[in-house]
Amino acid sequence: MKIAVLNGSPRAENTAAMVKAFADAAQEAGHEVEVLHVGRMKIAGCLGCNYCHTKGEGKCIQQDDLAKLMPAYLESDMIVYASPIYYFGMSAQMAAAMQRVFCIGKPAKASKAALLLSSGSPGVYEGAIATYKMAISYMGMEDMGIVTAAGEENGSEAKMAEIAALAKSLG
């Protein structure tokens, strides 16, 4: 299975550790994994101009780093969204990456998704999880799992093992 992991963090710490644990275990299980560093990309929010659905033939009028993500959205069998929690939601970069898929409507092949969330505090995931669930429902993807890590759980052996188990369970 071809898996695209979208890392929505601009930092190289907690979320990155979750992404690495998932990617390493998925590769060990025989999957092809591509990690895309969305948190370091310049992706503007959707303008709602509908150019993509009128004149653009599925292409957004904005010329930014979304072009780096489109092959993953078009060719992957699974999308893993990984983000730190900023103000009870995913990072702005991740939100833009998810919303801008509007230009193609839905990922062409992806039928599965997972969510990895990192935070400094427990109990702050509800908004991000709701956004994820609504998005994958609209896109027709099956939720394969959600893993959260708060405070000292970030980078812990137990949390990395939980993430690895998720990756290895994909079949």
Image (tube, rainbow, N blue to C red):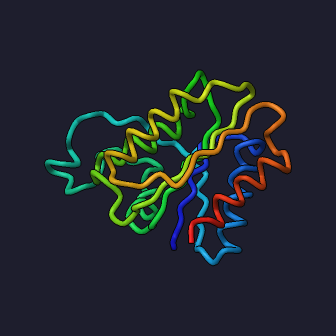
Residue in front for this viewpoint, 122 or 94: 122
Q: Vertical placement of 132 versus 109: above or below?
A: above
**Which of the 4 image quadrants contains residue 49?**
top left
**Which of the 4 image quadrants contains residue 112?**
bottom left
User: For the point 43% across and 37% down, which residue is it?
Assistant: 44
Q: Position of residue 98 (x, y in %)?
A: 43, 43
Q: Position of residue 36 (x, y in %)?
A: 58, 56
What residue occupies the far left of the structure in this picture? Answer: 54
On the question of residue 12 being in view, the answer is: yes
Q: Vertical placement of 141 versus 13: above or below?
A: below
On the question of residue 40 being in view, the answer is: no
User: For the point 26% across and 34% down, which residue is it?
Assistant: 48
Residue in front for this viewpoint, 139 or 168: 168
Q: Is residue 123 left or right of residue 113?
A: right
Total numbered badges shown on the rendered structure: 0
Q: Position of residue 29 (x, y in %)?
A: 66, 74
User: For the point 57% across and 66% down, which residue is it?
Assistant: 170
Q: Position of residue 92 (x, y in %)?
A: 52, 32
What residue occupies the far bottom of the structure in this picture? Answer: 30
Residue in front for this viewpoint, 114 or 106: 114
Q: Is residue 34 left or right of residue 24?
A: left
Q: Is residue 89 left or right of residue 166?
A: left
Residue in front for this viewpoint, 31 or 103: 31
User: For the point 60% across and 68% down, which residue is it?
Assistant: 33
Instruction: Quarter of the image for the C terminus: give it.
Output: bottom right
